[in-house]
Amino acid sequence: MKTIPIRKISTGYTELNVPGQFSIRKIVDVLKGKDIVHDLHKHDFFLILALEKGEGIHEIDFVEYKLKDSSVFILRPGQVHMLTMKAKCTGFIIEFDSAFYQPENFVTVQRWKKAVGKNYCKIEAKRFKKLYSVLFSILDEYNEMQDGYVDAIKANIELFFIDYVRQSNNQGSSKKVEVNYTQERYEELLSLLDQNICSTKNASQYASLMNLSLFQLNSITKSSVDKSVSELINEQIILESKRHLLATSNQINQIAYHLGYEDVSYFIRFFKKHTGHTPEAFRYNFK
C-alpha cells in the first residue's frame, strides 16, 4: 500500500551541531521570482509560514485558506496540505522537529499547544511587525552562528509563540483566555485520536486511555466543541480517509484495511453517510 508523500527538512538548511533539525528561509529566496505549487503531501516536522505579503491558496487537511498579508500558518507533523504561492509573496518559512525544540515547563507546554492547535491566523498589520522582528532576529542568529546562537534561536521561538498566542486569541478583546482542565483534556483526546484512529474507534476505549468515564469525557467534548466523543471519532476517520484518497493512489479496499475496516462495503457506506459521496466519487470529484 502506498503512503502519503512525506517531506523532510532539507539537510542543506540544517547544519547545526545540535540534536534535531531547524531551518529558516526568506520566502523570496525560495520562490526566486516564480510561483510555486506543492501537491498534496505531509511533513514529519513543524512548519511556520509567516507572510508579510501573501497571494495564493493553502489547503490544510482539506480546509482551504487564501494567502493574505500579515498572516501566519502553523502546521503540525502529519497534517496533509497543498500550497500554491505566488511570486509576489514575502515572509519567512521556518521548519524544525521536536528534537530541536520542545517546551520545557507547564506554562510553555500550554502555550505551545495553543499555538500549534491553530493552523491559521490573520494578524493586524501593526501587530504582525512585532512578530516579524522576532523572525528577523532568528534569521540573524541562524546565519551568523555566534556563540550561543542555538539558545538564542530557541529563546526567540519562545518569544514568537508568546506574541502569536497573544495576538491570535480573541483579537480586539482584552479578555484573558484561561487554560483550564477541560481544555487540556480535550487537547489530549485530539492527540490520541490522531495517533490511534486506525486501531481504536470506540469512545469507551478513549475514555479508558485517559482514565475517565465515558460520561466525563463526553462532558469535556460537549463543553469544548458541543460534540460527543463518537462524533469526533467519526470526524477523525473521515479526515484520515480523505488524506489517503487524495494523497495516494491506493485502492479503496487498501485504504479501508489501513483504517481498520475488514468489511470494505461497510467502510464505503460509512464514508458516504458522512460526506455524501462514495470514496471513489470523492476522489474523482476533488482530486
Image: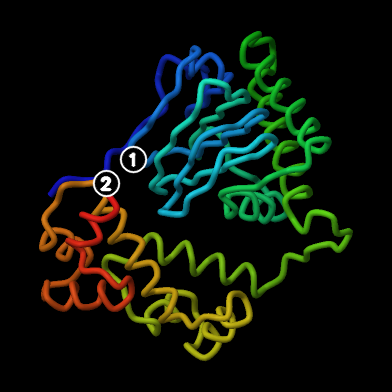
Q: Nearer the viewer, residue 198 or 71?
A: 71
From where the camera sits, is residue 99 visible? no
The part of the image, by quadrant, that contains residue 202 is bottom left
Residue 139 is left or right of residue 203, and the answer is: right
Name the residue located 56 percent from the left edge and 16 percent from the top edge.
Answer: 28
Residue 197 is left or right of residue 20, and the answer is: left
Residue 286 on image: x %, y %:
29, 53
Where disc 2 sits, the SS reads helix
Is residue 63 shown above or below 56? below
Q: Earlier in the sequence, mark 1 or mark 2?
A: 1
The part of the image, by quadrant, that contains residue 276 is bottom left
On the image, numbered disc 2 is attached to which residue? Answer: 247
Check the image and name the residue furthest to the bottom: 215
Name the residue located 63 percent from the left edge and 22 percent from the top edge.
Answer: 150
Residue 24 on image: x %, y %:
57, 22
Name the residue located 77 percent from the left edge and 59 percent from the top edge.
Answer: 170
On the image, numbered disc 1 is attached to which residue? Answer: 41
Is residue 157 shown above or below 105? above
